[in-house]
Image: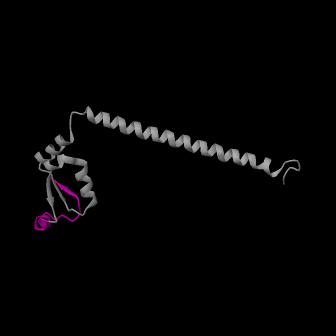
């Protein structure tokens, strides 16, 4: 039941105000989320610059410990791990099962990537 003295336009104002406030709230939340994401990533990058262990050091350590990575060129997860190592991937003992299928069968590799010690 509507109030006899209120027009439809006057009754719509609270809805418009509520929608406007929700939009403002969403924008504010998006700004806060962006700032948190940006500054947390920026802090991680700064921490990595000051780190004593580089990705190159880590790759060399894996190689020295006898770690082997088995993969194929069509495996997105293998490609992702290669990208994460960057140029340090040259240090990794990597067996490409596309070209070394016999070696991978003998090692009983069923999934890619597989890391073995």
Q: Give 99 or 101, whichever is nearer the viewer.
A: 99
Residue 104 appears at what percent x and percent y?
14, 64
The number of numbered badges drawn on the structure is: 0
Residue 50 appears at what percent x and percent y?
26, 31
Q: Give 16 or 57, whichever is nearer the viewer.
A: 16
Q: Give 19 or 111, whichever is nearer the viewer.
A: 19
Q: Residue furthest top?
A: 50
Residue found 27% across the figure and 57% down from its top? 77
Q: What is the quadrant of residue 48 in the picture?
A: top left
Residue found 55% across the figure and 43% down from its top? 27
Q: Residue furthest right?
A: 4
Magenta stretch encompasses residue 89: no
Q: What is the quadrant of residue 17 in the picture?
A: top right
43 displayed left or right of 3:
left
Q: Is 65 drawn above or below residue 39 in the view shown?
A: below
Magenta region, residue range: 99-117
Residue 11 appears at what percent x and percent y?
78, 49
Q: What is the quadrant of residue 64 in the picture?
A: top left
Residue found 23% across the figure and 61% down from its top? 112
Residue found 57% across the figure and 45% down from its top? 26
Question: The N terminus lies in which quarter of the figure?
Answer: bottom right
Residue 57 appears at what percent x and percent y?
17, 40
Q: Give 98 or 103, whichever is nearer the viewer.
A: 98
44 displayed left or right of 59:
right
43 displayed left or right of 29:
left
Q: Is 93 drawn above or below residue 33 in the view shown?
A: below
């Amino acid at each position: 039941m509507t109030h006899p003295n209120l027009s439809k336009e006057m009754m719509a104002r609270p809805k418009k105000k509520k929608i406007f406030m929700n939009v403002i709230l969403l924008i504010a939340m998006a700004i806060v989320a962006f700032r948190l994401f940006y500054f947390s990533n920026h802090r991680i990058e700064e921490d990595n610059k000051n780190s004593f262990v580089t990705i190159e050091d880590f790759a060399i350590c894996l190689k020295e410990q006898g770690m082997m990575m088995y993969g194929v060129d069509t495996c997105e997860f293998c490609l992702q791990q290669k990208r994460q190592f960057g140029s340090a991937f040259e240090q990794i003992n990597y067996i490409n099962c596309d070209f070394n299928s016999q070696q991978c069968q003998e090692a009983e590799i069923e999934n890619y990537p597989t890391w073995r010690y």
